[in-house]
Image (cartoon, rainbow, N blue to C red):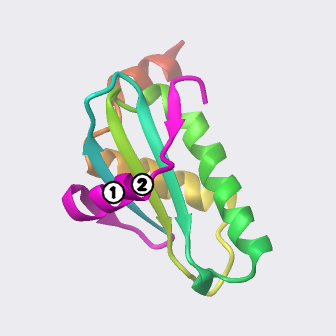
Amino acid sequence: MIKTVSLKKNSDFVRLYKKGRFYVGKYIVLYVLPNSHQTNRIGITVGKKFGKSVKRNRVRRLIRENYRLFEEFVKDGMDLLFVARPADTMPSFYDIRNEMKFLLKKLEVFDQEKWDCSRNS
């Protein structure tokens, strides 16, 4: 992730939970809040209800990789927090990709013009 930094401080996570706009999907909840930097900051949380560490780390990797693919289409200067939701089945790469794109569009941080231009060339 070239222009994205990880959220590390608990105070940043709490600020996003309290002040951020959010939208809920089947597998992911996305919290968004503008920041004062020119870079995006991303946080990923997976609770213990999701499963053992192998499942939690797998979902983290899937979310991180899908974000990496959408990174250039996300508007700059945003704090993003992805919270994985427990589900009956393990979500696939494509399930998370489709839901992530939907949530980013819903919260108006996805730049559709860049997406369309990259698809046409």
Q: Is residue 37 left or right of residue 98?
A: left
Q: Position of residue 48 (x, y in %)?
A: 61, 82
Q: Residue 97 colored magenta?
A: no
- Up the image or down, 95 lies above or below 32; here it is below
- Residue underneath mark 1: 31
* Res. 81 mark: 2
Badge 1 amino acid: Tyr
- Tell me which segment is drawn in magenta: 1-27
Q: Indicate the secondary structure of the residue bearing disc 1.
A: strand
Task: Give the quadrant of the N terminus.
Answer: top right
Q: Residue 13 colored magenta?
A: yes
Q: Indicate the secondary structure of the residue bearing disc 2.
A: strand
At horizontal 59% and vertical 23% (from top left) the residue drawn is 2
- Precedes in sequence: disc 2 or disc 1: 1
* Res. 95 mark: none
At horizontal 34% and vertical 22% (from top left) the residue drawn is 38
Q: Position of residue 23 (x, y in %)?
A: 30, 63
Badge 2 amino acid: Leu
Q: Is residue 26 left or right of residue 113?
A: right
Give the image quarter of residue 30.
bottom left
Q: Position of residue 31 (x, y in %)?
A: 33, 57
